[in-house]
Image (cartoon, rainbow, N blue to C red):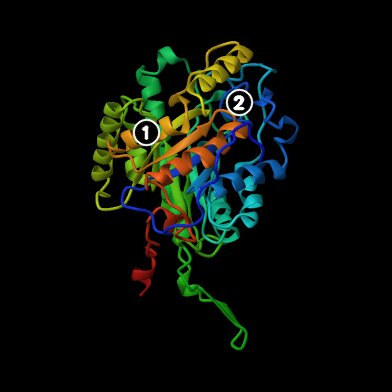
Amino acid sequence: MSSSSSLPSPSPASPSAPSSAALHLAVALDGAGWHPAAWREPVARPDELFTASYWTDLVSEAERGLLDFVTIEDGLGPQSARLSEPDGRTDQVRGRLDAVLIAARVAPLTSHIGLVPTVVATHTEPFHISKAIATLDYVSTGRAGLRVQASARRHEAAHFGRRSFPKLRIEDLETPALRELIVDLFDEAADYVEAVRRLWDSWEDGAEIRDVATGRFVDRDKLHYIDFEGKHFSVKGPSITPRPPQGQPLVTALAHESTTGAPFRLLGRSTDIGYVTPHDVDEARAIVAAVRTEQEAAGRAEEPLHLFGDLVVFLDNDPAAAVARKERLDALAGYPYTSDAKVFTGTPVQLADLLQELRQAGLTGFRLRPAVAGHDLPAITRGLVPELQRRDAFRHSYEADTLRGLLGLARPANRYAAAHA
């Protein structure tokens, strides 16, 4: 992958186990990058955005940087600068490949990095997604995850015809009707995750006998109905896919602070990794405390739950160059770029300082959103990573073969095995 930065590569040697001060790093991949004018940069490769080689190059670069995992954006409607409807713009990237299929294509070409595609739970079925992510876990030999997302956009609901939503406006977000809708969507997402997790466990480990001599391929007693009943769907089970190599691929979600509490409740109740968007240390500390409270309320206080801070990054060796690059891209877009997450402009050294500062608030890692994928992703892997390694704050080699292993998470027991025994 080409880059305008001349930066060192991460160290492949030194100890394989990270220090106690080590943090986790992921990148969020979205087309040409998170800035809407990113596709117009010389390194952007706009002609290749819908090719397998483009995505393979991005993920391979992330793996060369020893990152824990990548997330891959997806949606059920075209990208838009508006909250709830298409914007009609033709000067920005519109259109995506399916995130799960991208991950499945890239998986055999990588070895260690985790692959976490985005899935919109609101209009998809838990049964379909459970077997898709289980399959990805097999294809990647234990490196699959899932980023679950909820959607209240009317034009996306219209693709399916099963439900309708009111028009969303910023000024209406605190009205009783929209508050009720938000709570319902996040509760539905939690039910969705629960059904998916039960389906992953619906085959016990070792359910496949594969004994040619006796003619028995499956032990039917080790396949289980999950009998899930929720407000929006019911799922009988079992799955058609054997239990994934990780037992439970990682479930992740992005959550913003809300007066309803529903987004943080989803993290506390249902996920292994939550992405949050603090803009300073005090806000990070408050968010971590709120999510931990929800985790305890869900009866999961003793279970590991990683919290990753999200940041959009513009990285250059000169901080003035990073600022100038953002200003130039803003001029092309026609407006100053802002984000739900903190927007960082500066050097890899300055970013390392910020990450270590934010980590003191209780974050266990960070998911970085490269403003321009062709420039800022290599700046992360070849600039930020070596800097963190010099501080003994990031791994020098991959220390596990599965995504759960990289995050220090044990392979969970099957919920149905004890009852069967």
- Badge 1 amino acid: Asp
- Badge 2 amino acid: Gln
Which mark is first along the chain, 2 or 1?
A: 2
Q: Residue furthest bottom?
A: 213
Q: Is residue 83 above or below residue 62?
A: above
Q: Quadrant of the N terminus?
A: top right
User: How far apart are labels 1 and 2 at the CA level?
Assistant: 33 Å
How many numbered discs sit on the rendered protein? 2
Which label belongs to residue 79? 2
Q: Nearer the viewer, residue 79 or 166?
A: 79
Q: Nearer the viewer, residue 17 or 271?
A: 17
Res 69 seen here: yes
Q: Nearer the viewer, residue 282 or 85?
A: 282
Residue position for label 1: 353
Badge 1 marks a residue whose secondary structure is helix
Q: Quadrant of residue 135?
A: bottom right
- Identify the residue at horizontal 54%, vertical 35% (top origin): 379
